[in-house]
Image (cartoon, rainbow, N blue to C red):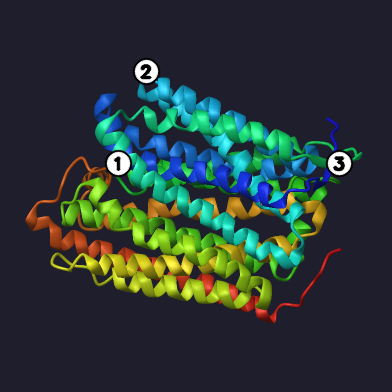
Amino acid sequence: MKSKQSASVQTSHPGMVLAIIMTGVLMVAIDTTIVVLALPTIERALQTGVTTIIWVIIGYLLVVTILAAQVGRLGDMFGRVRIYQTGFIIFIAASFLCALSWGVGFLILFRIIQGIGGALVSANSSAIIADTFPIQKRGRAYGFLAMGWTIGSILGILIGGVIITYISWRWIFWINVPIGIAVIALSIRILHDKVEQRSHSIDWGGMITLGVGLFCLLWAMTKMTTSSSSFNLTILLLFIGGAISIGAFVLFERVLSEPMLHLSLFKIPTMTPSLLASFFQGLANFAVLFLVLMYLQGVRQLTPMDASLLLVPGYLLTMFIAPMGGRLVDRIGPVIPATVGLGLQAVGLLVYAQLHIGTPLFVVVVGSSLVGIGGGLFFPSNNSAVMKASPSESFGIASGMLRTFSNIGMVMSFSVALLISAETISKGLAFAIFVGTTHLSKDLSTPFTHGLNSAFYGCMVFLVIAGILSASRSFSSKIRFT
């Protein structure tokens, strides 16, 4: 199959480009937090079980993770803007179908389709910004991109609570449709790919082997959290199959003249530590949301809405800090802001690790604030580092790789959180506590809290590893691409 190579985004309105990309990221973020809040309501409305309804979240994350690198490559081939707009249209159409879902199976299917659109949007967002803004202004732009994600997360909590309480869970998907149509109409007018004629072929072998490998590994991790035993023959076979498939993917990429994933990018000194820092940060940070919610809903017996509101200050701080962190990156580079941000997040988890049955709730706000400030420094810094290290013709690949590494960490983080928190009680009960369908009895509260404390300490270790990787970039040789 032949295509065209996108060289850059042609526009005289960089501010409008940033606003459009921020809105897209904001919508994807809204759907992440709003669906988490709606799980108990959807479970009751569709008359299904906890281990089934959780696939509404897991299915979406799996698809985004599997496709991120592939669709980043497609952006380089067919045009970043074209792929971004296609993803947005798929996301809106899938939201419409999710709102009409007449059974849990159909809802999971439509969420998977929504994940395809989300992957197309998220994997090309950073690349479009890299195409639009010069190197000296990208840090600030990525700061606003992180702010868009944070605003979406806050709106998901606040709007979701109102919709779920007073209207209907279906409106958490309906709300995407009119906003999405308006953004698509604006993007068609503002965003245009400036293309150069160049032939390419699609790496189907690489797409299939990487997709199958990631699916097997992530499905194995998921089954470990939902099956009655932590490890069995099926899980072992999934791990083996995933490892074999990813090994086959590496062989494909080494011999093809135009591979989907240029392994040569890993030879760039700052690329590998930046991608691994993103992985370990995702592995640590995404679990925090679930762990804190399990503490607040299970141990402190707060409603999902009240529990989530305690986390809003952290999101607000991320929203305000991210643009400032981006400007700091433009002045002094990404290493110091990213490393300091990871350090602050680790201190926040140390605060969380001290939680017990009688801890004042303001301590949760303190931990959330530290994690939020750290995130506001880390995300624009690390995004800027990856895109700055990448050659311009591979912006889409680099952006997709960044999303892939981060999403793999996020999905595994979810599994790790439940596995460790279920150290002292059954995984089924831990699952039910997370979605808010049950509360802990007093005699189980103390041992369950100890399990959560262990999980927070484990996440701190992941953040320390991420911090070491981030700091190591200061010792790497600097490579510039023109």
Dot 1 alpha-carbon crowd within 10 angstroms: few under 14, some 14 to 19, many 20 or more: many
Q: Where residue 317 sits in the image (x, y, percent)?
A: 43, 64
Q: Where residue 405 sits in the image (x, y, percent)?
A: 58, 55
| Amino acid type indicated by mark 3 | Val
**Residue position marked by numbered label 2 in the rendering:** 102
Q: Secondary structure at mark 1?
A: helix
Q: Where residue 314 sits in the image (x, y, percent)?
A: 38, 62
| Amino acid type indicated by mark 2 | Trp
From the image, which quarter does the N terminus lie in? top right
| Amino acid type indicated by mark 1 | Gly
Q: Distance from label 1 to label 3 (Cα)? A: 44 Å
From the image, which quarter does the C terminus lie in? bottom right
**Residue position marked by numbered label 3 in the rendering:** 195
Q: Earlier in the sequence, mark 3 or mark 2?
A: 2
Q: Quadrant of residue 284?
A: bottom left
Image height of 193 relative to 391, above or below:
above
**Residue position marked by numbered label 1 in the rendering:** 161
